[in-house]
Amino acid sequence: MIPGKYRSVSGRAANNVNCGLHLVIQTSSLPEKNRVEFRLNRETPPFPGRLLQHDLERNYSSRQVGDHINLASSSMPSFPILQRSSEEKILYSDRLTLQRQKLTVCPIIDGEEHLRLLNFQHNFITRIQNISNLQRLIFLDLYDNQIEEISGLSTLRSLRVLLLGKNRIKKISNLENLKSLDVLDLHGNQITKIENVNHLCDLRVLNLARNLLSHVDNLNGLDSLTELNLRHNQITVVRDVDNLPCLQRLFLSFNNISTFESVCCLADSTSLSDVTFDGNPIAQESWYKHTILQNMMQLRQLDMKRITEEERRMASVVAKKEEEKKRESQKQSLLKEKKRLTINNVARKWDLQQHRVTNITTNQNRKEFDSPQDPCQMDGSAISAFPEETGSLDSGLASALQGLSVTDTHLVEVDGDTLALYGSGALESLDRNWSVQTAGMVTTVSFTFIEFDEIVQVLPKLKIKFPNSLHLKFKETNLVMLQQFNALAQLRRIDQLTIDPQGNPVVNFTLWKYYVLFRLSHFSMQKINGTEVTQNDMVMAERLFGILAHVASSELPQYRLVSILGDARKKQFQYLLDTKAKKPGVVNEENDSKRLAGENTSHATLNYTTRDFYNEKLEEIKEKKKFCKMFIEDLVKEATEINRKNEALQKLWPQMFIELVRDAVMEIRNKNSYMKLCLQQITDQK
């Protein structure tokens, strides 16, 4: 006896499906003894109504073969031919079970066109064939065979249940004529893609568990689908599920789903009431349950467990907190993006300005080389040399500069203890009314994309507004000369100084650090560019620049020295001068006073001048050089002319002397005539 067991939607076991039959392997000349007979149980069970789809993937291992089978072998290949007696056909007219018969092909079934149920479970069938004449067939079970392709079903238009689980099928195909299909079981195959099912508008149950699916889509048209089993695949993304109007149960257990965004379409499904995610990475996340419940309010069961009202309430509370965090995160992201865009705009404007300055310098050099015009006409030439006016700047860059708004060309940011200023417009922020707490908290001030000469103008404000600032950072500030560091001496205190090589050519000088240590020695700086300052560094700085400062202060006139010093230093210096004037006879005290005055003022003589002033001085020096050159050229030219005339005179003088003597002798040869001529000349002059 071979029992056939099926389960209904309610989960109750259906009765065994059996019928008596004779299976005959018949060839053209086989004797009667080669006939194969099967004797099966005669119990007649009712036809199962519905199947619970996720039970279909269970192994039908409980079915046992109880009949004695005698199979006579045949030496010639052929299809088995099934024949049943008239009595058996009457008793089991609509069903036939051939499970566990070691069949490799489907037998030829003659005279059974009225069959509605056909069971080929647990055989070795590799191809579906010889059943095209069973056009009334409703239930076809080919579970646990070796079928590689869905075929031979085109004439079975009445088929409602097709069970092809645990085969070797790689592609869903050839289902075009099965438009009445109600249950399709394809679990345990090798399918990689959902396809060719959009026409199955009456399909209610689809089982694709234990396949090789990586994504879920192409489900449009399955308007009657109520249950979809996708357990034990490799799914990472789910789409189109929200287009299934009747879907109630979705099983996604044991896949590779890791984010809610990959299954967010489920939130738009109004009919879905039961879903499973257990065995996925997403189920291990702390936010898993409350995120699912908050976004899928229609659910009644999650992971086969009923959802309580308390769980919904807790999910709502957690979701609100998460929403607040998300809004704050979005706000921070927007601020970061705005900061990034603003810094990009500032950098673009800075690059355009540097490009413009380069063009000015180039144009001036060309003018000096090509024409003898006066190079000191800075005002007129500078204005006409701007690339926006001369057209020398690329039109795209010019339009980009004009397109920047005022609010996008600078940025002020306080991050912890750091005040970051981007763009020259940010310097105006130092005029704000900063709170005492914020101003006192700032210990680091960073300048980026700002001309150093502009920074110098606000250093007094910086000293007042942020008294605790100890660390200055400069990046893209056009530090090009050592004397620019002199401006930092007016601050109250500096412990650290960071000069970024980008946009600051001064760091290419070998001795720039030693100059900073010497000029700002009264600050006792601790770090420069992140490197600790040692005593040896201080000694080396004094050795390199001490003599230079001493010479500068010794040679400087007194009135210039007093104008350089600050008020306190002026009083100290005046006191030393007065002391020296009162005690002129005490030589040691005078020497000490002079030494003391030199020590206190030598560093201060290395003062700061703006680059514009420096350029003006260069132009003035250039003009003087030109004047001196022209004056010397004129002198040389005049001396050359005099020398040339002198040489010519030396050559002509002997002949001239002879002619002079000859003329004189001839004139005075007649004395009376010569006297009359002289008197006449005197008379004419009067």
Image: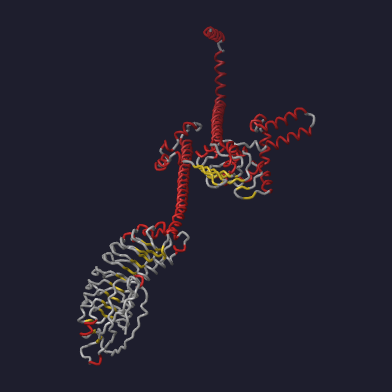
Residue 212 position within the rendered picture, expressed as x and y whole percent measured from the top left:
37, 69
Q: Quadrant of residue 634?
A: top right
Can residue 189 be seen here? no
- Furthest toward the right, the residue is 585
Does 631 sit above or below residue 468? Answer: above
Q: Nearer the viewer, residue 193 or 474?
A: 193
User: How many tags in the picture?
Assistant: 0
Give the residue drawn at x 69%, y 34%: 554
Q: Quadrant of residue 456?
A: top right
- Describe residue 70's horizontal placement relative to residue 653 as left or right: left
Q: Nearer the viewer, residue 435 or 622?
A: 435
- Describe residue 207's horizontal placement relative to residue 110 as left or right: right
Give the residue drawn at x 56%, y 19%: 660
Q: Nearer the viewer, residue 663 or 379?
A: 379
The quarter of the image holding the N terminus is bottom left
Residue 654 position within the rendered picture, expressed as x and y whole percent measured from the top left:
57, 24
Does 216 sit above or below residue 67? Answer: above
Task: Check the image and tell me how it is coloured.
Answer: secondary structure
Can residue 528 be seen here? yes
Residue 476 position within the rendered picture, expressed as x and y whole percent measured from the top left:
52, 44
Residue 518 position within the rendered picture, expressed as x and y whole percent measured from the top left:
65, 42
